[in-house]
Amino acid sequence: MVNPQEIRKDFPIFQTYPDLVYLDNAATTQKPTSVIEGIQRFYVEENANIHRGIYPLAVKATQAYEAVRKKVAKALHTSDPSQIVYTSGTTEGINLVAQSFLKPRLQAGEEVLISSMEHHANLIPWQRVCKEKGASLKVLPISDEGELTVATVESMLTEHTRLLALVHISNSLGTINPIEEIIQLAKSRGVTVLLDAAQSIAYYELDVEALDVDFLVFSGHKIFGPTGTGILYGKKALLEEMEPYQVGGDMIREVSFEETTFADVPQRFEAGTTNIAGIVGLGHALDYLATLPKKDIQLHIQQLTAYCTEKLLEIPGVRIIGTAPKKSGIVSFVMEDIHPHDVATMLGEMNIAIRAGHHCTQPLMEMWELPGTTRASFSIYNSVEDVDKLVEAVRQTQLFFA
C-alpha cells in the first residue's frame, strides 16, 4: 500500500509549504531529500569534470557519473549500459533520433507515423525532418474518448512507413496506449519504433528487450530527479550506425584540422560538459524509486484518477476530456463558461497547483475545438484529501464566476 502522508515526509517542499496541494506532476515532480542531498554531496565531495582527468577527484566523478548509466540499464532491463545515452530530457532524446537516425535514412515519399495525442516534442522533430526530406508525417486518429486502437495502427502502417513514434501515457489525456501490441505489430512490418515514456517510466516496469522497442526516451525531472537530465535508450546496432548531431568536447576519438573521428557509443552523443551533478542526482532518484513497489503505485494513482473523475463529474457544467477505458494519472477537464486559465488562477490562490492550457498538445486541442483544459496530474505523495480539496475549490470557482 502507498501511504502518501509518509511519502510526503521525504519531500522537503511539503515541509516548506504544508498546505500545498501539488497536482502538476505531469509537468514536473517534486524532489526527495535523497536527491537534493545527493546533488549537494557531489558538489561538496566529488566535483570535477569527467573522462578527462586522471587525478583521483576526476576519477571519482567519472565513476559516479558512469554508475548511473548502469542503474538506468538495470531499470530498463537491458544488460548493456552502452545503450544508455544521457540527454537533457525527452525533447533532446527525440531530436537526437530525428537528426542522427531518421534524417540520413528517410527518403522522399516515405512516412513517419505518430498519434494525434503526441506532445509537441514527439511531433515537431519528425515534422521538420519530413519537410526537409519530402516525406509525409501521418497522424493516427483517436476516438472521442481519447483511445488509440491497435486496429487503427494496423490500418495506417504501409510499406512506406519508416518510423512509428508513440507516447506510452498521454500527458494531456492520461490514455495508456497498448504499446506491447502496437510495437509488436510495427516490428512485424519492419518499422522502427520510438517510445515516449516520459509519463510512465516512474510508475511502470518497462523492459526494453521484452518490448523489442528500438528507442525509448524519458526525462529525469518527471521521476523525482533534476531538470536538465534525460535518457535515450537505443539498440546498440542502431546507435553504432548513427552520427552525432552535436559535436565538440570529449565525444571524439581523434581530431585534426582535416578530419575528426568520433568516440564509441554512447560517448559520441554526449558532447561538451554534460549535466554531471544532475546525472548523479538522477541516479539517486532511481535509487529512491527502487524502494517503492510499482504495482502499488500504479494502483494508487489509478484509484486517485478514478476518484477525481467521479467527484468532478458530480459538479454541473464540468466535462472530463479524455475518457479512454485505460488511463492513469491525469484528469483533464473543462468548465462551462469559465476559461481554463481562470480556473487555474483561482485554484492557485487556494494553494492548489494545477496546470491549464494546451499542455503542449495544441493540435489535439484544436481538433476538439478546445482553448485548452485544466489538468490535475497525480503522483505518489497525492492523496484522496488532495482530490477533495481540488473538487471543493472547483465548486468555489464555479460559484465565483456564476
Image: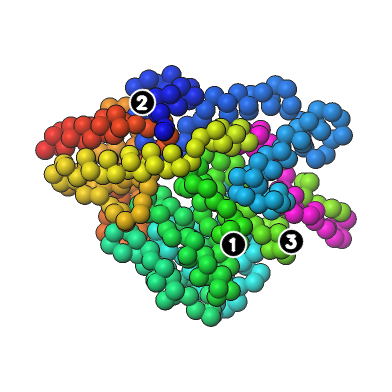
Left or right, 308 with respect to 259, comes to left
Q: Give the mark nearer the N terminus: 3 vs 1.
A: 1
Quickly name the residue at label 3.
240
Residue in view at x 16 percent, y 37 percent: 398
Residue 50 placement (x, y as % from top left): 77, 37
Q: Secondary structure at mark 2?
A: loop
Q: Are marks 3 and 2 in contact (CB under 8 Å)?
A: no
Report the magenta residues as a range. Answer: 255-282
Residue in view at x 86 percent, y 30 percent: 55
Residue 328 visible? The answer is yes
Q: Amino acid at mark 2?
A: Leu
- Between marks 1 and 2, how big is the CA–CA gap? 41 Å
Image mark for residue 20: 2
Left or right, 309 with respect to 238, comes to left
Residue 273 placement (x, y as % from top left): 72, 40
Single out the residue that lies furthest toward the left.
402
